[in-house]
Image: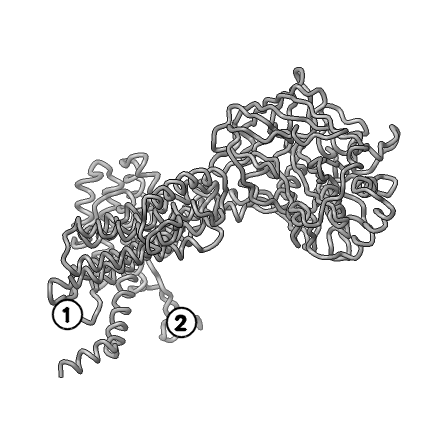
């Protein structure tokens, strides 16, 4: 019973730690507080049932009843008895919460808000896992099996996250599971009584078991490897390598736009990188019944932060259900026409967003994983991607007359759209002064927006170019408004900022212009057709598009009666850095003959106070990784080659040394006698013999360290190359040289040891297989064996050193001192 009382709280704590990955799903920590209450109630009732020695089935019933009471108190229906006693109405309320949780799962993307249905299903799941863990770890004494229900919690964030999940919560959960295993095993080991180390030393009751210590170290190493490996291996996650290889900038790599969900990518940087690519890739093919369609859109950035416009996480309902009908708000001067389109996304475009026209009313060939956000008017998914998808949808194209937009009343200040989409990160004096001058005397919101829209014209000095110029103001928007050079990102974001400064809701939309037209009404859209424009909200009308980017710089651009083209260039005018005045079907979204200065793109396009960040192309990371791998594989071969050259230089011949004769000179000349150097000759023989043994290891020939050199040479001649006269003589020479160096007074000198080594190596290579020869050259087994031996020796020394240090420190352990005092 004492063991059960110890393991029970650990099982409850391990369950809560295993639930840590759920923190990646919720916006706040309400789920953790409620789950802690439920798990604590379950653990408390489990301890009480074991205290009264209830059978296992009684413990299970008690824990389930405790979970029901906790859920009743946390999620009351209002008809409970004494606040926490459930009634039939309570269970009906639970059924409604369960049904509502299914709907919320389909409607919200991560991170989800604290809705009662989602909190209920979370607390119910964590409480149910707590019951199973307690039964397996305490009742059945099978704590290893408790990992299965814990794994069920792990699978939740993995299933709902589009990209890689955060690794830290998984480490916390793994630590809880290991804690449960260690607690159970310590209890089992202590039941055997006295414990001993491997060298027979007694382990006192206050001292941790050496086996348990080794297990803890192995567990820590295993968890670290399990977490770090997916982060480092390409393709397993979008984690470490993708982070190092990604970024914002003007690289010329082949990366694709839009990877990830809208809340986790920089739409501006993605667009900038695609427009500056020299490689053109087909992304989308769209067929529409509309004669002159507007832009195909896939995302919006509607939150203006200090670092620029950012995309919010969308939320909505499945697209295979009924979608909002935009014709219900059609007023005078608003014409709405029904069209149908079919979109085919190529395998070059993979993102969690689906390109559609502005107001879809019905979709086909898209499952319930795809959701529609009516506020952002985007189709998105938290579980799927657009790669290779083909789908059809019906949509409404709305056109407006200037009179209808002028008749739209100003949006009330307390309107949710006005409060949310007119905010700016702070007053910029230059922007405020410009906006006041532009809107002065304008009586309607449309006239104010039109005045701002017309400001971005060639008459005011604005020009299109796929690069921006720096300034000294410290504000990107001020630099753009001063230099007046940029492309679609600068125009769209700057107009949206100015419109917001005028108190009118605005946002930035992303999509494709109308690309090259092929069969009928089919358009092929490439990465150079990616575009950004501004959308302005009018009360009673909705979101109205305004494209302030010069039309001559954007092939396939569309203008309208309410936002006409303000700067059509003369046919003979050539604008530096811009495309041809009349873009044809094969035109791209940017100039094809731009110089190196045009590649220096303002990659972030945040129009805020941060400097643009440069990005190197993606491919050098993979090249560097490949070169590093090849260099790593070449280290054993280079080490083997260095050893062979060093030994060959030492054993090049008999070592001779010049000695001076102290006798009297003859005829006035000093006599110098050349005599062999015994010490050097022994070293040369030892080096040649060591090289022979390494060669035998490389070619998988057995080496017996207990044999004498002569016995080894004889066995080599007898078993390996008895028919090769040159190899036989070389092997016997090397054996005789090593034998004389070890045992004789005078070593063998004057013999060609290096040619003998070469002869033996050639004979071994001729009799070895192709795989053996390849390994001997690329990954020499002798080097790997030497490294393994050195590593084992170093590890043994470290273990011995830490063991001695630990033993000395344990002499002053408080638990030992108290145990000694109690014994006295």
Task: Please state the horizontal and vertical placement of residue 779, each as a whole percent of the image.
Answer: 35, 45
Q: Residue at x 73, y 39 (%)?
A: 538
Question: Which badge, 2 or 1, comes first in the chain's sequence?
Answer: 1
Q: Quadrant of the C terminus?
A: bottom left
Q: Is residue 653 visible?
A: no
Q: Residue at x 86, y 43 (%)?
A: 460
Q: Secondary structure at mark 1?
A: loop
Residue with the mark numbered 1: 201
Residue 578's image quarter? top right
Count of number-bearing discs: 2
Task: Please state the horizontal and vertical placement of residue 493, each as a whole percent of the image.
Answer: 71, 44
Q: Nearer the viewer, mark 2 or mark 1?
A: 1
**In terms of depth relative to the viewer, which is nearer, 30 or 183?**
30
**In terms of depth relative to the viewer, which is nearer, 207 or 749?**
207
Determine which of the numbered discs, if any, sits on residue 666 in the image: 2
Task: Please state the horizontal and vertical placement of residue 573, each as a whole percent of the image.
Answer: 87, 32
CA neighbours of label 1 inside 10 A, class few (<14), some (14 to 19), many (20+): few
Tell me how the rendering is colored. one colour
Q: Distance from label 2 to label 1 (Cα)?
A: 76 Å
Task: Please state the horizontal and vertical placement of residue 63, each as a whole percent of the image.
Answer: 25, 52
Q: Quadrant of the N terminus?
A: bottom left
Find the residue positioned furthest to the top: 520
CA neighbours of label 2 inside 10 A, class few (<14), some (14 to 19), many (20+): few
């Amino acid at each position: 019973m004492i063991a059960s009382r110890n393991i029970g709280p650990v099982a409850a704590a391990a369950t809560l730690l295993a639930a840590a990955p759920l923190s990646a799903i919720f916006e706040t920590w309400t789920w953790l507080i409620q789950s802690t209450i439920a798990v604590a109630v379950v653990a408390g009732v489990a301890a009480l049932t074991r205290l009264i020695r209830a059978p296992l089935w009684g413990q299970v019933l008690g824990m389930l009843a405790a979970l029901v009471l906790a859920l009743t108190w946390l999620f009351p229906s209002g008809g409970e008895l004494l606040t926490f006693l459930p009634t039939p109405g309570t269970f009906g309320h639970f059924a409604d919460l369960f049904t509502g949780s299914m709907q919320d799962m389909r409607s919200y993307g991560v991170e989800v808000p604290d809705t009662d249905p989602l909190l209920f299903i979370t607390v119910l799941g964590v409480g149910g896992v707590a019951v199973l863990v307690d039964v397996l770890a305490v009742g059945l004494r099978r704590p290893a099996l408790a990992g299965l229900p814990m794994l069920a919690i792990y699978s939740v964030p993995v299933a709902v996250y589009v990209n890689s999940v955060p690794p830290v919560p998984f480490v916390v959960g793994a630590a809880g599971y290991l804690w449960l295993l260690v607690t159970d095993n310590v209890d089992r080991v202590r039941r055997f009584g006295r414990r001993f180390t491997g060298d027979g030393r007694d382990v006192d009751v206050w001292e941790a078991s050496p086996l348990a210590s080794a297990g803890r170290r192995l567990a820590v190493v295993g968890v670290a490897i399990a977490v770090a490996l997916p982060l480092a291996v390409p393709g397993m996650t979008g984690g470490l390598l993708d982070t190092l290889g990604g970024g914002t900038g003007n690289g010329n790599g082949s990366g694709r736009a839009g990877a990830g969900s809208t809340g986790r990518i920089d739409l501006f940087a993605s667009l900038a990188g695609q427009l500056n690519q020299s490689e053109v890739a087909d992304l989308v093919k769209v067929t529409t019944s509309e004669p002159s369609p507007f832009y195909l859109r896939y995302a919006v950035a509607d939150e203006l932060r200090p670092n620029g416009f950012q995309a919010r996480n969308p939320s909505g309902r499945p697209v295979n259900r009924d979608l909002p009908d935009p014709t219900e708000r059609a007023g005078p001067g608003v014409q709405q026409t029904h069209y149908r389109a079919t979109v085919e996304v190529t395998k070059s475009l993979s993102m969690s967003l689906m390109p559609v026209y502005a107001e879809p009313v019905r979709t086909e060939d898209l499952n319930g994983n795809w959701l529609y956000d009516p506020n952002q008017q985007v189709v998105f998914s938290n579980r799927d991607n657009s790669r290779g998808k083909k789908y059809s949808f019906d949509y409404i194209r709305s056109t407006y007359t200037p009179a209808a937009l002028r008749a739209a009343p100003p949006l009330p200040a307390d309107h949710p759209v006005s409060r949310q989409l007119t905010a700016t990160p702070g007053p910029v004096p230059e922007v405020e002064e410009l906006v006041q001058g532009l809107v002065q005397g304008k009586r309607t919101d449309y006239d104010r927006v039109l005045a701002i829209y017309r400001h971005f014209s060639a008459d005011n000095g604005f020009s299109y170019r796929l690069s921006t110029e720096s300034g000294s103001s410290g504000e990107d928007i001020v630099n753009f408004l001063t230099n007046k050079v940029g492309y679609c990102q600068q125009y769209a974001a700057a107009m949206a900022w100015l419109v917001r400064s005028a108190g009118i809701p605005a946002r930035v939309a992303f999509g494709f212009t109308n690309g090259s037209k092929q069969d009928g009404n089919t358009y092929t859209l490439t990465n150079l057709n990616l575009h950004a424009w501004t959308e302005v909200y009018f009360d009673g009308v909705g979101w109205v598009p305004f494209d302030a980017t010069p039309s001559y710089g954007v092939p396939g651009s569309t203008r309208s009666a309410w936002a006409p083209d303000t700067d059509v260039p003369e046919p003979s005018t050539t604008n530096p850095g811009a495309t041809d005045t009349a873009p044809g079907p094969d035109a791209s979204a940017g100039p094809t003959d731009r110089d190196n200065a045009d590649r220096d793109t303002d990659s972030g396009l945040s129009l805020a106070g941060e400097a643009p960040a440069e990005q190197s192309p993606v491919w050098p990371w993979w090249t560097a990784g490949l070169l590093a791998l090849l260099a790593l594989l070449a280290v054993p071969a280079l080490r083997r080659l260095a050893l062979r050259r060093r030994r060959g230089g030492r054993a090049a011949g008999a070592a001779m040394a010049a000695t001076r004769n102290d006798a009297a000179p003859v005829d006035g000349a000093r006599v110098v006698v050349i005599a062999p150097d015994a010490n050097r000759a022994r070293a040369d023989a030892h080096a040649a013999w060591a090289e022979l043994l390494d060669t035998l290891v490389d070619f998988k020939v057995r080496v017996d360290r207990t044999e004498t050199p002569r016995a080894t040479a004889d066995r080599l001649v007898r078993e390996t190359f008895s028919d090769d006269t040159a190899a036989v003589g070389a092997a016997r020479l090397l054996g005789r040289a090593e034998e004389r160096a070890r045992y004789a007074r005078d070593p063998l000198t004057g013999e060609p040891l290096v040619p003998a080594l070469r002869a033996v190596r050639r004979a071994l290579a001729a009799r070895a297989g192709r795989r053996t020869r390849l390994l001997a050259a690329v990954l020499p087994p002798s080097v790997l064996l030497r490294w393994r031996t050195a590593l084992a020796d170093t590890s043994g020394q470290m273990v011995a050193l830490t063991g001695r240090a630990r033993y000395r420190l344990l002499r002053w352990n408080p638990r030992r001192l108290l145990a000694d005092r109690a014994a006295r």
